[in-house]
Amino acid sequence: MQGEIQPESAASTVEETVANAVAQTEKPPELTEAWDVAVHKVEGWGQTAVSSLPNVVVAIVLVVLFVLLSWAVKSLLRRGLKHTPITKPVANLMVAATGFLVVVTGLFIALGILGLDKTVTSLLAGVGILGLALGFAFQDIASNFIAGIILSFRRPAQPGDLVETNDFQGVVQEINLRSTLLRLPTGQVVYIPNKKVFENSITNYSQLGVRRVDVEVGVSYGDDLEAAHRLAVDAVEALDLHQPDHPVQVFFREFGDSSINLDVQFWIEFGEQSDYLAAKSAAILAIKRAFDDGGITIPFPIRTLDIPSSGGKAVEAVLPSSPGEDS
C-alpha cells in the first residue's frame, strides 16, 4: 500500500534527525580546546594534590610540633630569666621573641617540605624590606627601644637607686623599654627617654652603699687653727653616723674674705637621701657646739669701708634725713 511507511525508511529518518541535532549542538573548536586544557589542568592538580598529600600531612604535623616546642621553650626561658638581673619588660620581650623565632623556623621548614622554597625566599626578602622601612620610619622609638635593652643588661642603676642624669636627681622607679622613670625629692615623676640616659653620664649614689659627707665651715683669722681642726674631728667622731674604717678628715681649703675655710669629710652608710641629709645636719650641729665650747669663732662676712679724712661729702649729707628732723 502506498500509505504504509516501511520500517527501514523510518529508522533512517530517525537517525538523520538525531545526527542533525548532535551536529547542531556540537561545541566550537576553540571552546572544545579550552575545555580540554581546563580538564587537563584540574586532573594535573588532582594528581599533584594526591601525590603531595603525605608532604602536606608531614608539614602540618611539623608546624604543630614547633608550636608546642615554642610553648615549652618560652616556659623554660621564663623560669630561667627569673634568676637573672634582667628587668621584667626585657625578659618578656626575650621570651616572646624566642617563641616567635621557633614558630617561624617551623613554618619555613614546612614550606621547604612542600617544595615552596621560592616562597620562603620571598618571605625573607619581604621581612627584610619591611624591617628596613620600619627602622627609618621609627628611628627615635627604635633607638629608645635598643637603649632600654642595653641598659637592662648593663644595669648602671636599678629600681631604688638614687641617681643623677640629664640634670635630674631622683630615685629610679622603673627602667622599661622606652624610658627611665625617676621620682624626684619633691614628689614628681620624670620620664627620661632611654636614648638620653644611655648617651649621657649617670651618677649612682647608691651602688656602693656608702657616701662621703662634706661640711664646709670657716673660722676666724685670730683663732687657733690646730684647735679648730681637733675640735671638728672630735665632734664628728663622737657621732654614731660615721664609719669607723674611714677616718674623719679635715682640710683647710682657702683664705676667705672674713675667715679661713675648711672642709670636714666623713663617710656614712648610704641607703637613701635622708641618710645623707640627717648625717650632714647632725655634723653641722656637733661642730657648731664644739666650736662654741672651745672658743672658736665662726665669723660673719666682714666688709671694710674706707672713708677718707678729707674730700668727699659728710655721711650726714649723704644719708636721707628722717621726717622728724625736717620739722
Image (cartoon, rainbow, N blue to C red):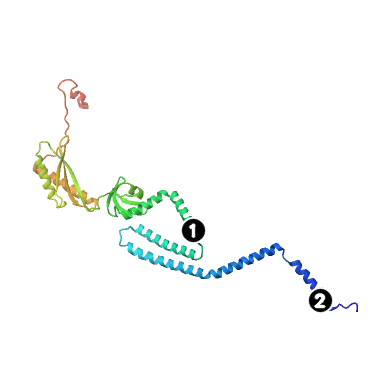
Image quadrant holding the C terminus, namely top left
The answer to whether residue 327 shows anywhere in this view is no
Count of marks placed on residues: 2
In percent of width and height, residue 5 lies at 86, 77
Q: Which mark sits nearer the N-terminus, 1 or 2?
A: 2
Q: Quadrant of residue 4?
A: bottom right
Residue located at (15% from left, 42% from top)? 251
Nearer the observer: mark 1 or 2; the answer is: 1
Disc marking residue 140 = none
Residue at label 2? Answer: 11
* Residue 239 vertical placement versus 261 (above, below): below
Q: Which mark is residue 121?
A: 1
Q: Nearer the viewer, residue 47 or 317?
A: 47
**Seen in the image, is 210 located left or right of residue 121?**
left
Residue at (40% x, 59% y) in the render: 97
Instruction: Give me the residue at 37% from left, 59% from top.
Output: 94
Looking at the image, which residue is at 37% across and 52% down? 146
Quarter occupied by residue 324: top left
Front residue of 139/293: it is: 139
217 vs 121: above or below: above
Residue 86 percent coordinates (x, y): 32, 58
Mark 2 neighbour density, 10 Å: few (under 14) some (14–19) many (20 or more): few
Q: Distance between the Cα atoms at labels 1 and 2?
A: 68 Å
Q: Nearer the viewer, residue 201 or 65?
A: 65
The amino acid on which the numbered mark 2 sits, given as a three-letter code, is: Ala
Q: Name the secondary structure under disc 1.
A: helix
Q: Is residue 116 shown left or right of residue 235?
A: right
* x and y percentages locating residue 105 in the rendered image: 44, 62
Q: Which quadrant of the rendered structure holds the N terminus? A: bottom right
Residue type at numbered disc 1: Thr
